Image (cartoon, rainbow, N blue to C red):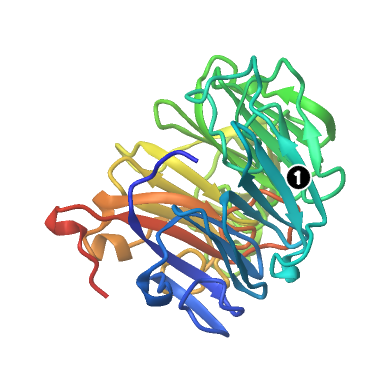
């Protein structure tokens, strides 16, 4: 795992099982709150959140679970949480490591359900080309772990994997050249190939050829990627406005605020609702099967992206956090449970003068890290890195 700066982690959204450390049971956290680690002693460097529990990894190699599943384990370099499996990457002899799959309710006691030694590839991407140690992509960058059998899934030797994200039914891969590949189910347009057909093997996203991508993220049934120049491309299912495109469900509630025109030309599935102010039927986007360029705000350059099952979070270079999509459990961080089909800035970090120190972390399936076929998560985590600057102090 790459060395990260120390920081304070914030959680928000559904915490009914105590998924966020120190949040308590039966709570919905509608605005970011600092995680309260036991005795303030946990130096958390990585978070992986499933629907009912969260795995926290410390710099000292300890994994601690919080929520419906509990337990601790030492000697770990990474953890990946899903409702089906808890996957640990533990240091092995030499340059190798051991991959272990546990039942989430096992408290990591006894023997794992499955384990396998993993080695660095002799002729693979260099460490600066991959995000080695970030599960579900394995350190060798030639295979990934799945929450369902077969747990160990090799990638084609021609794919120089840099990052891999799993949605509920699809996968996204970013390679060393900045190209994006997708495969799996496509019935919600989440693969980005312009159809609703499934793809059994990784297929290059032709619509993005020639554009170097820096980040990818997979929601339950939608996908997002960021270019090296900070542009946002988004596609897939828009049921809750997670694509920041007009959605019928919000229009019926009188909450739709986004505008769209000419969307039929790029292959989107457009549904017409009640007449707008000019008398013309209002366009609603149910499925966007091609990558669409999203304008966040004038002058904004996106640097991090994360997806929940039906919501999206983007962090800009200036440290502003924008979220949109499904907000029923407060997972958007706007102090309410509103669902939005437009990007909206999370004001908490601006009010606390922490925006210059904010660093994004994955959401969970119903929080913000959607990387496995799990129930939708409803919470997310971000880290405000502390420094000696006056505006980096946390006020609660």
- The residue at the far front in this view is 93
Nearest the viewer among 81 and 324 is: 81
Query: Total marks drawn?
Result: 1
Q: Secondary structure at mark 1?
A: loop
- Residue 285 in view in this figure: no
Residue at 45% in and 38% down? 2
Label 1 CA crowd tier, 10 Å (few <14, some 14–19, many 20+)? many
| Residue bearing mark 1 | 188
Q: Is residue 63 left or right of residue 167?
A: left
Give left or right: position of 168 versus 29. Answer: right
Residue 335, percent from left and from top: 41, 73
Query: Is 347 drawn above or below residue 165 in the view shown?
Result: below
Measured from the top left, where is residue 189 in percent x and y?
73, 39
Above or below for 49 versus 90: below
Where does the image place residue 308, in percent across and percent down from the top left? 60, 55
x and y percent of residue 182 in the render? 71, 31
User: Where 387 sits versus 132, above or below?
Assistant: below
**Quadrant where the C terminus lies?**
bottom left
Q: Answer left or right for 244 relative to 96.
A: left
Q: Quadrant of residue 347?
A: bottom left
Of all residues, the one furthest to the left in this rendering is: 390
Give the camera-side residue of 130 and 173.
130
Task: Name the foreground residue: 213 vs 240.
Answer: 213
The residue that appears at 45% across and 74% down in the rendered structure is 30
The residue under the point 38% across, 53% down is 321
Above or below, 130 against 306 in this view is: above
């Amino acid at each position: 795992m790459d060395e990260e700066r120390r920081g304070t982690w914030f959680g928000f959204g559904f915490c009914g099982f105590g998924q966020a450390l120190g949040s308590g049971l039966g709570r919905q956290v509608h605005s970011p709150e600092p995680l309260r680690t036991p005795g303030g002693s946990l130096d958390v460097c990585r978070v992986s959140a499933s629907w009912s529990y969260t795995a926290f990894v410390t710099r000292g190699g300890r994994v601690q679970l919080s929520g419906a599943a509990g337990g601790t384990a030492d000697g770990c370099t990474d953890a990946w949480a899903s409702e089906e499996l808890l996957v640990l990457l533990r240091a092995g002899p030499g340059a190798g490591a051991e991959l272990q799959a546990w039942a989430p309710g096992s408290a990591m006691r006894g023997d794992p359900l499955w384990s396998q030694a993993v080695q660095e590839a002799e002729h693979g991407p260099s460490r600066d080309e991959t995000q080695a140690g970030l599960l579900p992509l394995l350190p060798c960058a030639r295979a990934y772990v799945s929450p369902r059998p077969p747990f160990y899934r090799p990638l084609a030797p021609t794919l120089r994997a840099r990052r891999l994200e799993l949605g509920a039914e699809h996968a996204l891969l970013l390679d060393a050249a900045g190209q994006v590949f997708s495969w799996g189910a496509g019935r919600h347009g989440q693969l980005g190939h312009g159809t609703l057909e499934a793809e059994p093997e990784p297929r290059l996203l032709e619509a993005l050829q020639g554009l170097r991508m820096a980040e990818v993220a997979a929601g339950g049934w939608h996908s997002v990627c960021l270019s090296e120049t900070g542009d946002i491309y988004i596609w897939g299912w828009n049921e809750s406005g997670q694509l920041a495109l007009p959605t019928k469900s919000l229009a019926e509630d009188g909450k739709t605020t986004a505008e769209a025109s000419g969307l039929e030309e790029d292959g989107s599935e457009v549904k017409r609702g009640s007449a707008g102010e000019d008398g013309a039927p209002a366009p609603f986007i149910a499925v966007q099967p091609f990558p669409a360029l999203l304008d966040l705000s004038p002058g904004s350059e996106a640097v991090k992206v994360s997806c929940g099952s039906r919501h999206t979070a983007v962090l800009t270079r200036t440290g502003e956090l924008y979220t949109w999509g499904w907000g029923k459990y407060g997972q958007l961080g706007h102090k309410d449970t509103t669902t939005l089909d437009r990007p909206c800035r999370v004001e908490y970090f601006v009010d606390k003068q922490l925006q210059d120190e904010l660093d994004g972390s994955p959401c969970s399936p119903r929080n913000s890290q959607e990387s496995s076929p799990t129930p939708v998560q409803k919470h997310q985590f971000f880290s405000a890195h502390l420094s000696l600057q006056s505006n980096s102090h946390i006020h609660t």
